[in-house]
Amino acid sequence: MTKRLVLMLAIVSALLLAACGQEADYETIQIDQVAEKQDAGYTVLDVREPFEFDQGHIPGAQNEPLTGMQNGDFEGIQQDKKYVVICQSGNRSQQASELMLEEGYEFVNVAQGMSSWEGNVEK
C-alpha cells in the first residue's frame, strides 16, 4: 500500500511540474530590447487603457486596450505588421499576447511594462 501511494504521489508531482514548466507559444523579450525591435520594424502596441496611455507612452506606440481585444475588437491591429506588446507591468500584455496568438498576429511580448521603462515618453 505504501509503495503504491508513493508511486502515485511521484506521478502526480511529475505531472504538476510538467504543466508548470510549459512555455508560451510566443516570444517574450525584456524591456531593454524594445528599441531594438522598433529598429527592426516592429510597432509598439500598448494595451493599457487610454487614460494610462495618455499619461505617457513609448514614442510611436499605438494604443489598443486589452479590454477591446477581450471583446473581439482587433480593428486597429493589422495582420501584415509586427508588434511589441506592452502594458504597465507585464500582466495585461501577456493576456493580450494570448489573444493575438489565437488571431494569428506576429508579435513579441514584453516581460515588464511601462513601470520599468526608462526611455523617453510621449504624452
Image (spheres, helix red, strand yellow):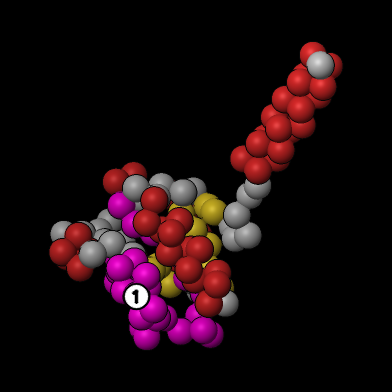
Residue at 50 percent across and 80 percent down: it is 81
Asked whether residue 86 is drawn in magenta, I would say yes
Residue 19: image x %, image y %? 65, 43
* Farthest-out residue, top: 2
Tell me how many marks there are. Answer: 1
- Which quadrant of the rendered structure holds the C terminus? bottom left
The reply to whether residue 112 is in sight is yes
Residue 109: image x %, image y %? 49, 58
Residue 28: image x %, image y %? 54, 54
Position of 70 with respect to 13 (left or right) is left
Local packing at callout 1 (Cα closer than 10 Å; few below 14, some 14-19, many 20+) is few
Residue 105: image x %, image y %? 54, 76
Magenta residues span: 59-88
**Callout 1: helix, strand or loop?**
loop
- Does the magenta stretch mainly form a helix, a strand or a loop? loop
Residue at 28 percent across and 56 percent down: it is 120
- Which quadrant of the rendered structure holds the N terminus? top right
- Depicted 5 relative to depicted 50: above or below: above
> Label 1 sits on what residue type?
Asn
Residue at 45 percent across and 56 percent down: it is 94
Residue at 39 percent across and 78 percent down: it is 72
Q: Nearer the viewer, residue 2 or 74?
A: 2
Asked whether residue 89 is drawn in magenta, I would say no
The reply to whether residue 62 is in sight is no
Question: Which residue is tagged 1?
Answer: 71
